[in-house]
Each structure stands twice: as C-alpha cells, then as structure tokens.
Amino acid sequence: MTSASTARARAAATTAIGNLPYLVGALVVGLLLFYLVGFDEGATSLFGNTMVVHEFVHDARHFLGFPCH
Amino acid sequence: MPAKVVIPRAALAGALGGVVAWLFALWFAEPLIQAAIDYEAERGEAEAALDAAAGIAPPEEGPEIFSRTVQGVWGIGAGMVLAGVALGLLFAVVYTLAQGKVALRPRVLALLVAGAGFLTLYASPFVKYPANPPAVGHDETIGDRSGLYLVMIVGSVVALVVAVLVARAVRERLGTWNAVLVGGALYVVLAGLLVALLPSLGELAANVATYGPATTETPQPLRDPAGRIVFPGFDPDVLYSFRVYAITAQVLLWGVLGLVFGALAERSVGPRSQARELESV
C-alpha cells in the first residue's frame, strides 16, 4: 500500500466516524418532521391533542397521501 | 462529501422540491380538495336530515381552527415544504452512506437515491393505500389506517434494503445488470407480498360493522330507509384526478430533490476538486 492510499484510507475512516453525529441528527430530525407533517394529532399526538398541527397541514396531509379523516 | 456538507444541501433541495409541489398543489389539487369538502358538507346535511327523521342526534362537527383559505394556501405550503425538508434529511443519510460504496457520478447517485425514496416512502404504499381527498376516510379508523400506512412504508424500506443486499451479493457471479434485475424482482415480490397480505381499508372490523363489507372507504350513495338514493356517492372523477395529481406532486418533489442535490454535489466535486484529487495521486 502506498503512503498516499494509506492516508486516503485513514481520511475515509476519520470521515466515517466524524459523520456519525450528523447522520444521527439528520435521521432524528427528518423522522420527527415526517411524523409531524404526516401523522401527529391523528392516531397519536406528541404535544397535546389540540388539532392545531392536524388542521393547519390538513390539505398537505391529504395530498401527500397520509391517512386523514 | 462529508455528512455536514451533504445534509444542508439535501435539506435545501428538498425544500425546493416542496415549493414546486406546493405551487402544483395550489393550481391542481386545491379545486379538488374544495370540491371534496363541499361534498362532505352537503352529504353531512343529507345525513343529518335522515337522522332527524329517524330521531337520532346529529354527529359532532370537527374543529374549525383555520379558515379554508389559510389551510388551502399556507397550510398546504407549510406541509409540502416541511415534508420536502424531512425527505431531504432522510435522503442525506442514505446518500452519505451510499457514496463510498458505488462508482457513480454524484448526480447519478442522487437520482437513484431519490428514486429509491419515491419508490419506498410513496409509490409502494400508494399501491395498497392510495392518497384520498377529504370525505374519503372514516374518522373511527384513523388509528388503523395510520398503522397500516406505516407498515407499508417500513415494509417497503426493509424490502428494498434486502433487495440491494442480495443484488450486491450476487453481483460477482451474475454481473451488474443481472444482479440489479434479481434485486428488482426480489423487491417486487416482497412488496407484492405486503400488498397481498395487509387488509384493505373496507375490510377493517370497524368499517364492516358500520358500513357492511366493502373494499375501500369511498362514500357510497346515501339511501333512506326505503332504499332510495337521497345523495350520490363520491364523484369518481374527483377521486381519480386527486390521486393522479398526488402522484405527480411526489414525482415533482423527489425529482427536484434529486436533480438539485445532484447539481450541488457535482459542483463540490467539480473540476477544481477533481484537479486536487489528480495532484494527490
């Protein structure tokens, strides 16, 4: 293995570890947003069942194919 | 590209996709949504008249927190853009993990990942549980419907992961083209099993008890006790157009997400950074 390819392999490994917190963050925020737009205040409710979220994004929920009344 | 570069670009591309889908929705979906809401209201009056004749109290109305204008212009906009950002973030996770494993140009990989998202998070679930306008869908089954829709989404994602792993495993022996065919066929079989095994909405116990056996929750003609039709069933043309436009909006959203992100990703590995790569070799 040349020193250049070793350096590249090490750089790739460092990036993979450095990526982890960002990937977990993107996954959690992405899933939370997906849930809020698509499902909250329908069958389940995270922040109190006020129906404000459900009613505001009502049309989008229908048009994006999520279950709605 | 490291995740911290991929994520904001993918979120931006997703938001742009959401904006395009919003503009499309304002033009094409809103008239149909309004028609469906009008149908629901008029049908409600006809049902109330029947109930009154039979001496039953009318059902409660849903809450009216936002006007139709707010829902139909800003609510749908917020929903589409937030959904775009959410899908962009999920796209970013898959793209970051996939980029080191394939020998594809960034813009090609971006379109592939967007296509996979469309297939698993939307198209496959749609085959079993298609998008419905207001008036189609019973309040009392919202829990069942949410659960079943989630099962379709998660099941499709698992099916595609399995298909990709199998395709990678047989690639050495069969070559790339045939390995992709095997993976594709496996996905169709797995997703098809899900579609075949999950219940149709009309078959849910709550629906059979109230409405009798049916395939869907689409409102049928309303009949008086003598069996005469006093109010028509839901307009099938409205239902058809709504669903075609709903698919179109998703194609636009995922398409813009994949193409815009692909262009942004190509720029970051453009001529300058390619030159740097060459120097280091």
Image (spheres, coloured by chain):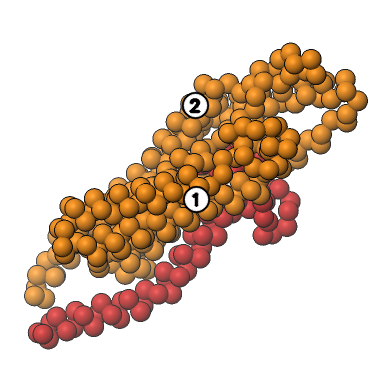
Chain colours: A red, B orange
Give percent across and percent down for residue B172.
16, 64
- What residue sits right under mark 2 in the picture? B240
Give percent across and percent down for residue B36.
61, 27
**Same chain for the residues under marks 2 and 1 in the image:** yes
**Nearest the eye: B80 or B8:** B80
**Nearest the eye: B274 or B102:** B102
Residue A4's place in the image compared with A48, above or below, is below
- What residue sits right under mark 1 in the picture? B152
**Nearest the eye: B28 or B56:** B56
> Which sits earlier in the primary sequence, circle 2 or circle 1?
1
Residue B80's place in the image compared with B43, above or below, is below
**Nearest the eye: B159 or B252:** B159
Give percent across and percent down for residue B50.
82, 21
Residue at (65%, 33%) from the top-left corner?
B213
Q: Amino acid at mark 2?
A: Tyr
Which element type, helix, strand or loop, lies under badge 1?
helix
Q: Amino acid at mark 1?
A: Met
Q: Residue furthest right?
A: B55
Question: How far is disc 2 from disc 1 in space, using C-alphas?
Answer: 22 Å
Residue at (30%, 63%) from the top-left corner?
B165
- Do residues under tags 2 and 1 come within 8 Å of each other at their CB atoms? no
